[in-house]
Amino acid sequence: MNGNQRQAELVAAYKELLRSYLEKRPSGLRKRISDAIGTNRSFVSQITNPKYSVPIPSHYIHTLMSVCHLSPVERSEFLTAYLAAHPGQAELLDNSAMVDSITIDLSAVKDEAQRSLIKRTLKGTAESLIAMALGKTKD
C-alpha cells in the first residue's frame, strides 16, 4: 500500500467515527455545522462522508466537536484518529483550543445573499472590535 492510499484510509477512519457520532444526534446537525463554520452544506457533506477524500481542515475541528456536542470519550477517539491522519496538525489543534467562538442562528433568513451579507458584516464587526480591544487599528 502506498502513502496516498494509507492517508486516504486514515482520513476515512476519522470521518467514519464522526459519521457514527452524527447518526446519534438529532437531525439538522449538518446545517448547524455549516452555519458554525461558515460554509455551505455540500462542503459539510464532503468533510463528514468517509467516501470523500476531502480532509477536515484543522481550524474547524474544535468548532465541529463543540457543535456536535461530542462527549470527552468521543472527542478523544476522534482527535486520536484525526491526528493519526494528520500528525502535523497537533500544534495547530492545541493553539486552536484557545479559540472562542459564537454561533448565530441565521435560519430565519432564507435568502442566501442576505445571509452572506449578514455573515460578512458580523465578521467584519467582530474583527474591528477585537482589534480595538487589542489596541490596534484594523486596516
Image: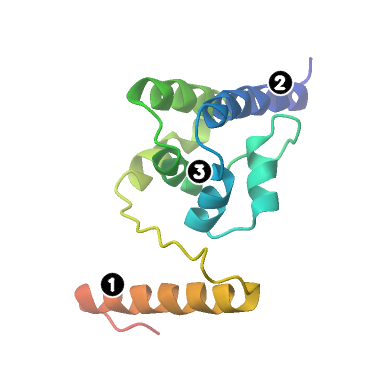
* Res 76 seen here: yes
Residue nearer the viewer, 49 or 2: 49
Q: Are marks 1 and 3 in contact (CB under 8 Å)?
A: no
Alpha-carbon span between mark 1 and mark 3: 22 Å
Q: Nearest to the eye among marks 2 and 3: give it.
A: 3
SS category of the residue bearing label 3: helix
Question: Could you say which quadrant of the image residue 7 lies in?
Answer: top right
Q: Looking at the rendering, in which quadrant would you find the C terminus?
A: bottom left
Residue nearer the viewer, 88 or 37: 37
Question: Could you say which quadrant of the image residue 109 lies in?
Answer: bottom right
Identify the residue under disc 3: 58
Alpha-carbon span between mark 2 and mark 3: 19 Å
Give the residue at x 47% y 55%.
Answer: 36
Residue nearer the viewer, 84 or 46: 46
Alpha-carbon span between mark 1 and mark 2: 41 Å
Give the residue at x 54% y 60%.
Answer: 38
Residue 13 in percent (x, y) is at: 63, 22
Q: Amino acid at mark 2?
A: Arg
Identify the residue under disc 1: 130
* Res 57 seen here: no
- Give the vertical position of 87 relative to 58 (above or below): above
Q: Amino acid at mark 1?
A: Ile
Q: Are marks 1 and 2 in contact (CB under 8 Å)?
A: no
